[in-house]
Image: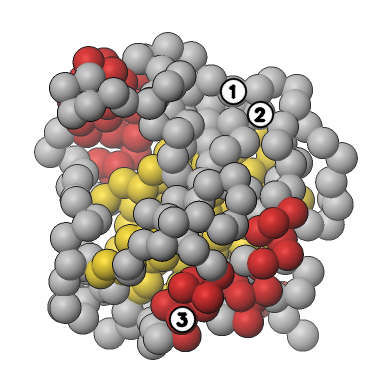
Amino acid sequence: MAKIVLLLLYMAATVAVVVAELQRFEHPVKSDGSLSFLVVGDWGRRGLYNQSNVAYQMGDVGEKMDVDFIVSTGDNFYDSGLIDEDDPAFFESFTVYWVTMTTGVMSWHNLAQPSNKEIANGFALDLLSSMLDVDAALKGSSAKWKIVVGHHTIFSAGHHGNTEELVDKLLPILEANKVNLYINGHDHCLEHITSPNSQLQFLTSGGGSKAWRGAVKPFNLDAMKFYYDGQGFMAAEITENEAYVAFYDIFGNMLHKWSSYELTHTAS
């Protein structure tokens, strides 16, 4: 059975930050060998800016897909994060919306729990001292599918645009290690960009609450497969041979879908 690697990268604005040890977590695949999950980012606004609508639709789509877990791309509590574990913002922005609306549908896991099981591999990275940590983790993986999740964009047509530090230092590592998907937030939009040099797909899911309507930068139209400047989320399903991605808005409409079959089918 194929193994799936998720490298969760919570990166600061620059590349050089504090050292963090890689920790493994596991989640069993379904009986058919598939693994499905939802991705949401930039969401913690106490239900405002359609956060509650996003959560409701995630519950609906998640139930239909029988998703295994949720991935957050960061910026979970606006505007100043959490003071401590008793901060009311945790209840007001997280428990009321995400937990309540997805009870019985999705599993929530502590990614810091280490595991040695070989069903589905993952590594949780909170901070990185250098891209060598990422390179080593990817090189040490035998998984067929490699998915890296970070907060900051590599490429984007949104408000923040490209992150040059990641273009220069992270992108070559991802391409050299044949990473399939790079998933991020940071720009408050939904977005799908392809790489001209590899099969790497750049997927932005930062529409969990406040969106930046009209904040679109000029971008290569050949690489830009989808851009939506409103709220919503992303869904993904990984099987042994295929990867599927879809983006949804606050009404549950599927705005865009992609399958890795498109890469093999169009390859010369």
Query: Depth check: 2 or 13 in front?
Result: 13
Neighbours of disc 1 within 10 Å: few (<14), some (14-19), many (20+): many
Q: Give the structural element (helix, strand or loop) at label 3.
A: helix
N-terminal of the two: label 2 or label 1? 1
- Which residue corresponds to the image point at 16% horizontal and 78% vertical from the top-left? 116
Tag 1 residue: 211
**Residue 207, percent from left and from top:** 52, 31
Residue 238, by quadrant, is bottom left
Whether residue 260 is situated above or below residue 256 in the rendered picture:
below
Q: How far apart are marks 2 and 1 (CA)?
A: 6 Å
For marks 2 and 3, give the CA distance: 35 Å
Q: Is residue 131 visible?
A: yes
* Cβ–Cβ under 8 Å for marks 1 and 3: no
| 139 and 251: which is toward the camera | 139
- Tell me the quarter of the picture where residue 214 sits: top right
Crowd rating for badge 3 (residues with CA inside 10 Å; few <14, some 14–19, many 20+)? few
| Tag of residue 136 | 3
Task: Point out residue 263 in the picture as x, y percentages from the top left corner.
Answer: 65, 73
Numbered circle sitting on residue 229: 2
